[in-house]
Amino acid sequence: MRLFEIYNRVSLLAVVAIILVTGVVYYYTIGVILTDQVDKDLVVEENEVFDYVRLNHQLPQVFKSNDQQISFTPVGHSVVTRKYINTTFWNEKEKESESGRGLISSINVNNINYQIRIIESKVETEDLVRIIFLITIGLIVLIVVVLFVINRILIKKLWKPFYGTLQQLKLFNLTDKDDIEPTNSKIEEFKELNNAVSTMTLRVKDDYQNLKHFIDNASHELLTPIAVINSKLDTLVQTGNFSERQSELLTDLYETVTKLTKLNKAMLLLSKIENNLVNDSQPINLKNSIEASLNLFHDFFLDKSLTVSPYLEDVTVNISKSLLDVLLNNLLTNAVRHNKAGGQVVISLNEYQLTIKNTGADKELDGSQIFQRFKKSGESEGNGLGLTLSRQICTSYGMKLVYNYAPPFHTFSVIF
Amino acid sequence: MKLLVVEDEAGLRDSIREYFTEEGTICEVAVDFEAAVQKISVYRYDCIILDISLPQGSGLDVIRMLKAARHPDGVLIVSAKNSLDDRLLGLNLGADDYLTKPFHLSELKARVMAIVRRKSFDGQQSVEFKEIKMDLPAKTVTVHDIPVKVTRTEYNLLLYFIANKDKVISKTAIAEHLWGDEMDIADNFDFIYSHIKNIRKKLVEAGSKDYIVAVYGMGYKFMEHEAI
């Protein structure tokens, strides 16, 4: 629920409640005041009766007016208590009964006790109250409508800069060039928010640039010494006449430097992908890429006498060419490396997934461990980053890489 | 052949110079941006091996100056930066090739030779080594003008050997040349042996001498002179 919806609801409820209470209070107060007024009229009438009796020693003529009725009833010796009553008033003209206010009093005329009953119609009073009630209801409706409109239009307009900033934040992408635009709101809070967001995004972008530079620098700083070692080795072997022992050592050195290079490259690539620094995706026909990779692996398959069965459909995905090659090479390398001589590799590609199955050890791998960095089986010659890299590549393109084991096949599936 | 190596890292620079310097090849060096600019403003080279990240300047500016002056020198960028942007930028500016550090000297040599061939006066279409002749556009091999049927791998291997004649080439260098350096199968190079055995057999059967020798289990060498 939005902020101003909640605010709207609360403020409207409060206003309606207050007006209702006021209405009730009005109703009763005015009722009391008007009844009081009627009571006074009744007393005046009573006094008139008393005056008449005092002068004439007989009851006045009973007359009826539109809004007043007086009646005298002999009551013998019983005592009549003077009191006001709420009663009904029969309107002769309109032929209907109306609510009325009455005064019961008593008078002694020629030693006969009479009860005086003066009734006055309260219809005018009630009309007045009704009008007040209608005005109150009208006010409620008016205020609700006005508040609603004000909230809808004004608050929406007031919050516009906030939603503008929010929208820009949602669309914010580190690799984009545009910054958060300054807002032209007059409201201090939103200006501050926008400034804070702008500053933050600029700082984040700055940090991101630094990180990018650090990766570049690290790459340069680490690879250059390795390049020197490599070139020195290449130069050293030209000097000739090595003993068998020396040759073995040199061969080991070569292999180790190669591993070091690959490890370093894999780490740099991993960090690049994790920081989204690789963004050269393009539509690529997976079938063609896989066929090219299989071609490249031909010798490796042959070397282990593996039977390779590709079942490939035409599928196009959006991915970076270089990362796709890394992904395919890693998965195929695993399928070869962990295979047994004379085993099988089954590759199938359809629009939902790419699966690479291989025979190998008769034991399921620990699915929670294999994708972690530097987790590798004891006999593996890899650098322990292959599957981590593969999963990271898949994740960064919204795909999933999962492992499962159904004897005799270990299966890695890339789910698009 | 005249080459210029622009590289600030002394170790690498010296190795390259030593590897390339031989009969008929002069290899000059420049240690920084200034030196490189001075050299290219005066001398012409068949190929310039250019490190992009130089003290006091970018190697890319060296390419810009070469192109602005319409010098025909070939340019091979060597960089530790393996980013596609840099690669594309370098190649768009007019560099002929891009090699990521670290690399094997034999790979560098093969790339330089390819550039020099392309840049040479007539856009050399073939590579000849004594009785062996390789037709580059057709990717075919003849010995004494008799065609030899070779696979693509064997063809690449032979071209690589001829570019690095008289040098010991390590097995890892050969593997990386044939299968790319992204390939992570360093555990087993046995099948390199079978490819080399095949190409040797085919060449000898076609009447060529046997120039390829194994060196101490480390690698192979393509000898100018017949192996004894």
Image (spheres, coloured by chain):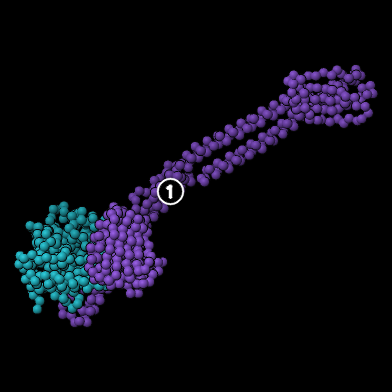
Q: In the image, residue A189 lies at what x, y percent?
A: 48, 46
Q: Is residue B63 above or below residue B210?
A: above
The cyan-tinted chain is: B
Pick out the residue farthest to the left. B144
Q: Secondary structure at mark 1?
A: helix
Q: Provide residue B103's location: percent of width, then percent of height.
A: 22, 67
- Return the residue nearer the eye: A353 or A79: A353
- Can you tell which quarter of the image residue B26 is in? bottom left
- Say which residue appears at 34% left-offset and 57% top-offset: A353
Q: Quadrant of residue A409?
A: bottom left
The image quadrant where one finds the C terminus of chain A is: bottom left
User: B181 or A329, which is in the foreground?
Assistant: A329
Residue sitting nearer the eye, A55 or B51: A55
Please tell me which residue is depicted at 15% across the width and 67% down the height of the picture: B154
Chain letter, purple in picture: A
Which residue is under mark 1? A195
Give the side of residue B121 with respect to residue A170, left or right.
Answer: left
Residue A229 relative to residue A141: left or right: left
Residue B18: percent from left, percent from top: 15, 70
Q: Looking at the picture, tell me which residue is in the foreground, A307 or A389.
A: A307
Identify the residue at image location x=52%, y=38%: A151
The amino acid type, in three-letter code, at marker 1 is Asn
Residue A329 at least partly seen: no
- Residue B179 seen by the camera: yes
Q: Residues within 10 Å of mark 1 (few under 14, many from 20)?
A: some
Left or right: A363 in relation to B24: right
Tell me what residue is drawn at x 80 percent, y 22 percent: A69
Question: Numbered disc 1: what chain?
Answer: A
Q: Decide: is A260 above or below B121.
A: below
Circle count: 1
Residue A258 in the image: state x and y as whole percent.
26, 70
